[in-house]
Image (cartoon, helix red, strand yellow):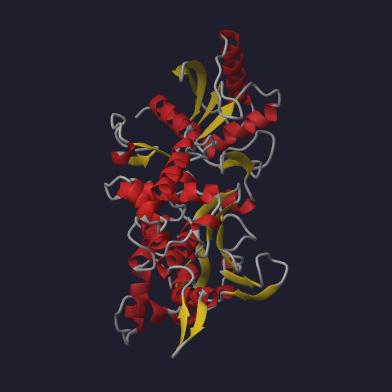
């Protein structure tokens, strides 16, 4: 697919069903007179994997309009001059006027550059920009350093967390016993055999006569994350509040261990502090949220966080009416498409290692399993939110249909449709009744929910030729 075909597809994805700007594309209603801001956009797209597109002729509300030839010529000339003169080095850009929804729009393509970061001319390297949550924002110093390392072929996981260590020091800093326990293997008697295993998993590497521990080794298997300066601010925090706001805190706990070492204990801790204790014949805890969903969303937060953003550790917050999980970094996929699109990770080696260790589900199936578990417990839908700097997931305790908001009903119906579609099936009135635990007498209620979800543009009839509503089936808008 060439850039023009891809641009049309991305524009369509950004406008339907809910208009929202994506990282790969920025709508423009006119040419800004702020040269520096235009240079920032070009910097951000040149630093973005796969590059990006400016689309002129789209208003902030997502509606389109035609451009005149004079407007097109001025935009192309202005951006061409900025690409030539206002960045650290000249970059090529391409343009094309294409029709979309009956309107002639100008598409300006900025390809990804090999030599990154591309920053503003006349300023230092930290005047570099990137795309986050559909916005152009300045990179932090850590993000610039990470981009330099990545452009040189050195990922975050491969960077060194601690160097000039002896074998004994490595084995003291890393919980190698946990690795063997997770792999269900016996710990060898030989130190050399253990070091070889750690090296095979890229947790450490030999450098001449000493050893270096990688960021991957530290973030997964540290006995204490504080032993590694690179890991500062990347511990997991769990906070529990009294009531529905954060004014009165019950406790705050900071994780000490690497993610692989402490993961199961973390999930146990969250489940204990979100469950309801019931005393009947014997004392038992009734889970408020399905364990599989808690596991998946916490694992996702760990894997997909942006390690270049400091001061925003993965944080789990427990309220009486919700559980929220927050990680640094905007999601790389559209939050409306997290169920069906294959995951994109900033940290591929970390994601693969957590999959190999059985912490994450098979790639691409985890969100499906989490949403399915939510449906099985008849809970309100999961809510995904994003900003330029973070991604947040909300889970809610069980509530009756009458207590759900209209938006919650729509979201639940849409997520139900996505889940069914991934299984090769379609939703209908009965399946929606099953999702909301409704009886056959509540067919009209299910019909209302389906109609509202269609009106929101999130589902569509599977077969437009079916006339009878009784036999109507539906699929997600992207199907």
Q: Nearer the viewer, residue 131 or 79?
A: 131
Q: Is residue 206 left or right of residue 116?
A: left
Quarter of the image with the C terminus in it = top left
Task: Judge whether 85 appears above or below 159 on screen.
Answer: above
Q: Residue at x 44, y 39 (%)?
A: 451
Name the residue at 30% across, 79% down. 184
The residue shown at (60%, 74%) is: 254
Residue 182 percent across, percent down from the top left: 35, 76
Q: Does any portion of residue 228 appear in the rendered image?
A: yes
Of 247 and 202, the residue lying toward us: 247
Where is residue 181, by image quadrant? bottom left
Seen in the picture, residue 256 relative to 415 is either above or below; the reply is: below
Seen in the picture, residue 164 relative to 335 is either above or below; the reply is below
Residue at the extreme top of the image, as rendered:
69
> From the image, which quarter does the N terminus lie in?
top left
The x, y position of residue 35, in whole percent, is 68, 26
Where is residue 467? Give x, y as percent: 30, 31
Q: Residue at x 53, y 25 (%)?
A: 55
């Amino acid at each position: 697919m060439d850039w023009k075909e891809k641009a049309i597809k991305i524009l369509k994805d950004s406008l339907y069903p809910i208009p929202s700007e994506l990282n790969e594309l920025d709508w423009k209603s006119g040419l800004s007179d702020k040269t520096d801001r235009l240079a920032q956009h070009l910097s951000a797209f040149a630093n973005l994997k796969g590059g990006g597109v400016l689309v002129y002729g789209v208003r902030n509300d997502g509606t389109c309009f035609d451009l005149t030839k004079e407007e097109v010529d001025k935009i192309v000339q202005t951006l061409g001059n900025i690409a030539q003169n206002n960045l650290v080095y000249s970059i090529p850009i391409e343009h094309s006027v294409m029709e979309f929804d009956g309107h002639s729009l100008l598409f300006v393509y900025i390809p990804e550059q090999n030599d990154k970061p591309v920053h503003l001319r006349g300023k230092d390297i930290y005047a570099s920009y990137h795309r986050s949550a559909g916005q152009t924002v300045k990179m932090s110093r850590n993000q610039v350093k990470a981009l330099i390392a990545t452009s040189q072929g050195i990922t975050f996981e491969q960077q060194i967390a601690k160097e000039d260590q002896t074998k004994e020091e490595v084995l003291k800093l890393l919980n190698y016993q946990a690795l063997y326990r997770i792999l269900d293997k016996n710990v060898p008697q030989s130190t050399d055999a253990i070091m070889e295993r750690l090296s095979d998993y890229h947790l450490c590497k030999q450098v001449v006569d000493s050893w270096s521990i990688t960021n991957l080794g530290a973030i997964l298997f540290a006995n204490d994350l504080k032993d590694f300066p690179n890991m500062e601010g990347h511990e997991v925090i769990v906070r529990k509040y009294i009531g529905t706001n954060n004014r009165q805190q019950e406790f705050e706990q900071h994780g000490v261990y690497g993610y692989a070492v402490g993961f199961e204990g973390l999930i146990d801790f969250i489940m204990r502090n979100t469950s309801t204790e019931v005393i009947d014949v014997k004392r038992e805890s009734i889970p408020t949220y399905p364990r599989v969903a808690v596991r998946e969303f916490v694992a996702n937060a760990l894997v997909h966080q942006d390690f270049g953003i400091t001061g925003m550790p993965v944080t789990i917050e427990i309220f009486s009416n919700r559980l929220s999980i927050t990680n640094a970094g905007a999601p790389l996929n559209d939050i409306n498409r997290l169920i069906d699109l294959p995951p994109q990770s900033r940290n591929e080696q970390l994601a693969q290692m957590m999959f190999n260790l059985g912490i994450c589900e098979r790639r691409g199936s985890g969100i499906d399993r989490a949403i399915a578990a939510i449906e099985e417990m008849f809970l309100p839908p999961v809510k995904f939110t994003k900003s330029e700097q973070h991604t947040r997931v909300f889970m809610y305790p069980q509530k009756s249909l009458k207590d759900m908001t209209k938006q919650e009903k729509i979201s639940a119906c849409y997520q139900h449709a996505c889940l069914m579609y991934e299984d090769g099936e379609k939703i209908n009135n009965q399946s929606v009744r099953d999702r909301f635990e409704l009886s056959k007498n509540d067919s009209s209620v299910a019909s209302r929910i389906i109609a509202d979800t269609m009106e929101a543009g999130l589902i569509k009839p599977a077969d437009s030729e079916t006339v009878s509503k009784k036999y109507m089936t539906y699929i997600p808008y992207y199907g």
